[in-house]
Image (cartoon, helix red, strand yellow):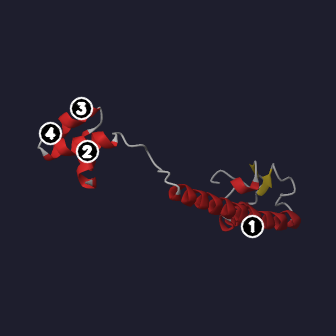
Amino acid sequence: MASLKAGDAVLVCKIDRAGRSTRELLNAIHEIGQIGATFRSLGDPLFDTAGPQGELLLAIMAAVAEFERSLIISRTSEGRARAKAAGVRFGRPFALSPFQRAEAARRREAGEPLSLIAASYGCSARTIMRLGAAS
């Protein structure tokens, strides 16, 4: 945006790649227009802001793209909720098995140094330290 000059054209492969929301997209296109440049979408050749029809179509498609993005977010959220209900655990896997975690916690409570416990399991002392916070 900083290097745009009057007469330049901003090209995007698809209109939904130009902004995360309709407002963001329209603000960017307005800013481009203020500079005197135009906006074009390669995937949607009708969207050329050089004319009023292109600006109208752009606003309509931006709204559709935002609606589609909302649907995707909704569907993925529902999928995550179903997976969690089915017992799927998200996130990074545990560095230690449940048996190792229990054994490491016992060793820590017995006063053994964290670095020594961690070395025996091939993990960091921070991993062993977090076991104390979880139990």
Q: What residue type is labelled 1?
A: Ala
Q: Position of residue 128 (x, y in %)?
A: 25, 43
Of tags 2 and 1, the one toward the viewer is 2
Crowding near the residue tagged with mark 4, few <14, some 14–19, many ≥20 C-alpha atoms within 10 Å: few
Compared to residue 102, the image places residue 27 above or below, namely below
Marks 3 and 2: in contact by CB < 8 Å?
no
Q: Quadrant of the N terminus?
A: bottom right
Which mark identifies residue 113?
4
Per the image, the residue denoted by label 2 is 102
> Judging from the image, what secondary structure is the residue with disc 1 in?
helix
Residue drawn at x 62%, y 53% is 2
Q: Quadrant of the C terminus?
A: bottom left
Which mark identifies residue 119?
3
Q: Which amino acid does label 4 sit on?
A: Pro
Using the rendered view, name the quadrant where residue 112 is placed: top left
Which mark identifies residue 105?
none
Per the image, the residue denoted by label 1 is 63
Q: Which amino acid does label 2 sit on?
A: Ala
CA gap between label 2 and label 1 equals: 53 Å
Using the rendered view, name the quadrant where residue 81 is placed: bottom right
> Judging from the image, what secondary structure is the residue with disc 2 in?
helix
Question: Is residue 34 among the parts visible in the rendering?
Answer: no
* Between discs 3 and 1, the one toward the N terminus: 1
Q: What residue type is labelled 3?
A: Ala
Of tags 2 and 3, the one toward the viewer is 2
